[in-house]
């Protein structure tokens, strides 16, 4: 009998075929960049959890990579029998399965020592698959003879504010799951038995692709499982705002192409996308777009932010996963057509927020519309800055009062089949201004890459040369974002827009 890890049992819960492939065809797995990034975040939160649960640093850490599984299990068993200190990554093997516990805390009770198990997650709330995860973990530990007094799940408290000085007490918020978890022992035993049957098969299970391929995780075998599925010319996924219920109905009815979708099931927006996609035509209410922008005068400002978020805050006064701006680009267009650009970028590694806010106020002047794309994002960041720096609250509020969103103009007045059902700026720009291309940029080509290289730039071990290269890439990327807004505004304004003249 093969011993199955907890992660593989959770994979089985998502899809038996995924489990079989992980065991027998691991080379076919191709995890997305997002999945890999989530693993990294999990490691960071786990490291901080050790400091929270063992502030004196007296606990033991089991290192499976260094000790091997047999050594890790043996040392875990010895520590669980004897130790009076926290144990991290303690290993258990029993009933055909194995698991590593994030945190084991000693508890003294009548009749001897027992243990409190805490499983740590990087999310800000308890999800259903977390409950399965903890149930599996506790079952294996108890089957291995560990005396568990209680079980809890620790998630990040998104409302907690980092006080600084490496003090992370309060970052994690526990949910007690003891009674629920212990009551599921028979259920978990059944999962293990069924999973063992699956991995014992000589051929992979035949399971059709579906919503389970991405819930609760994006499966790394999606490309493999979809390899033989004919791709529809006009997939139903092009429909914007497609509800889970309608998606499920399409799947049940075998509808995967827009041509087979009944018109009466669609909203007006979805119907428009279907018509123009199938006809290969462009919808553009040019008069309406120009009218939307007529009331806004000059100088016209075009603004875009780049932000970073940390599961574990590194700057005093910030919250977990808070979007913190570290860069902006601002293009300023005069009525004559003269165009200038201003920029801010802080790669020092210190909290850039105060300097960002001051630079933004100075750059935006006192009057004129400030055009953005998806105003909810930028205005929320400005409000947060105003809340953190009351002395700047008035001029920051004045900036927000001048913001004009180009997204509703695009959404209501324009659609090109090349957008494929999306009105994101990265979908709309190539359709309206095809000569602008992010592919020509060196290095940073999207927001995710910007966040990644920012984290690299602020690391102490990053060389000055590499930091300068990252600075050039970030400045070029953000500059293209706001120049793209200028060109989009010009496209929507039509004949009312002045010819551009470079002031730089």
Image: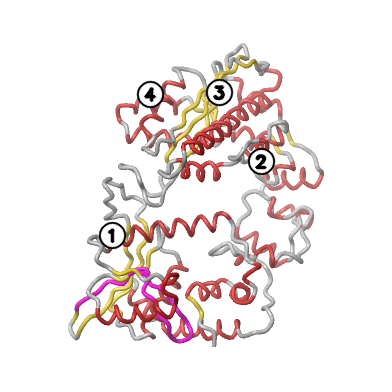
Which residues are the magenta region? 88-108
| Element at label 1 | helix
Q: Earlier in the sequence, mark 3 or mark 2?
A: 3
Q: Residues within 10 Å of mark 3 (few under 14, many from 20)?
A: many
Q: Is residue 297 above or below residue 246?
A: above
**Lower position in the chain sequence, tag 3 or tag 1:** 1
Q: Which residue is mark 4?
A: 395
Residues at marks 1 and 4 touching, judged by CB atoms closer than 8 Å: no
Asked whether residue 184 is in view, the answer is no
Q: Dots 1 and 2: beta carbons under 8 Å?
A: no
Q: Picture quarter containing residue 461? A: top left
In 3D space, how far apart are the residues under numbered discs 3 and 1 (Cα atoms)? 45 Å
- Is residue 132 placed above or below 77 in the rendered structure? above
Nearest the viewer among 350 and 241 is 350
Between residue 87 and residue 485, name the one nearer to us: 87
Please say whether residue 500 is visible from this viewpoint. yes
Residue tagged 3 = 331
| SS for callout 3 | strand
Say which label, 1 or 4, has the lower sequence index.
1
Q: Nearer the viewer, mark 3 or mark 1?
A: 1
Q: Secondary structure at mark 4?
A: helix
**What is the distance, in whole Å, between disc 3 and disc 2 at their CAs?**
21 Å
**Mark 1 or mark 2, earlier in chain:** 1
Residue 368 lies, in percent from the top left, at 50, 19
Q: Is residue 412 left or right of residue 168?
A: right
Q: Nearer the viewer, residue 449 or 501?
A: 449
Which residue of the protein is positioned furthest toward the left in this rendering? 110
């Amino acid at each position: 009998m093969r011993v199955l890890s907890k992660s593989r049992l959770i994979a089985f819960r998502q899809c038996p075929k995924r489990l079989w492939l992980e065991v027998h065809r691991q080379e076919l797995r191709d995890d997305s960049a997002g999945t890999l990034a989530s693993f990294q975040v999990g490691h960071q939160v786990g490291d901080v959890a050790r400091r929270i649960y063992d502030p004196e640093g007296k606990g033991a850490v089991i290192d499976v990579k260094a000790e091997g599984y047999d050594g890790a299990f043996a040392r875990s068993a010895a520590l669980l029998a004897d130790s009076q200190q926290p144990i991290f990554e303690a290993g258990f093997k029993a009933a055909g399965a194995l698991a590593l516990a994030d945190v084991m805390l000693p508890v003294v009770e009548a009749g001897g020592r027992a243990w409190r198990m805490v499983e740590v997650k990087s999310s800000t709330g308890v999800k259903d698959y977390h409950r399965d995860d903890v149930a599996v973990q506790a079952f294996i530990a108890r089957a291995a003879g560990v005396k568990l007094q209680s079980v809890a799940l620790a998630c990040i408290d998104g409302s907690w504010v980092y006080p600084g000085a490496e003090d992370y007490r309060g970052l994690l918020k526990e949910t007690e799951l003891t009674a629920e978890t212990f009551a599921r022992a028979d259920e978990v035993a059944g999962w293990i038995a069924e999973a063992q049957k699956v991995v014992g098969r000589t051929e992979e299970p035949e399971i059709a692709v579906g919503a389970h391929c991405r819930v609760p995780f994006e499966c790394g075998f999606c490309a493999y499982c979809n390899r033989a599925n004919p791709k529809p010319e006009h997939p139903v996924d092009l429909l914007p705002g497609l509800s889970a219920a309608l998606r499920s109905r399409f799947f049940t009815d075998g509808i995967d192409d827009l041509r087979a979708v009944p018109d009466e099931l669609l909203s007006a927006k979805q119907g428009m996308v279907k018509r123009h996609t199938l006809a290969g035509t462009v919808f553009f209410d040019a008069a309406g777009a120009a009218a939307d922008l007529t009331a806004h005068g000059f100088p016209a400002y075009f603004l875009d932010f780049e932000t970073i978020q940390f599961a574990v805050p590194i700057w005093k006064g910030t919250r977990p996963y808070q979007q913190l701006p570290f860069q902006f680009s601002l293009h300023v267009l005069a009525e004559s057509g003269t165009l200038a650009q201003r920029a801010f970028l802080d790669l020092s590694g210190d909290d850039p927020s105060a300097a960002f806010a001051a630079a933004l106020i100075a750059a935006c002047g006192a009057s004129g519309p400030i055009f953005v794309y998806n105003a909810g994002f930028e205005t929320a960041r400005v409000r947060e800055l105003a809340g953190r720096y009351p002395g700047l609250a008035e001029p920051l509020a004045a900036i927000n009062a001048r913001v004009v969103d180009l997204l509703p103009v695009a959404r209501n007045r324009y659609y090109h089949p090349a957008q494929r059902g999306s009105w994101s700026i990265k979908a709309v720009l190539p359709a309206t201004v095809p000569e602008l291309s992010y592919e020509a940029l060196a290095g940073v080509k999207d927001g995710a890459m910007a966040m990644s290289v920012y984290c690299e730039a602020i690391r102490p071990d990053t060389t000055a040369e590499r930091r300068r290269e990252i600075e050039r890439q970030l400045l070029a990327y953000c500059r293209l974002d706001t120049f793209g807004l200028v060109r989009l505004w010009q496209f929507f304004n039509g004949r009312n827009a002045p010819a551009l003249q470079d002031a730089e």
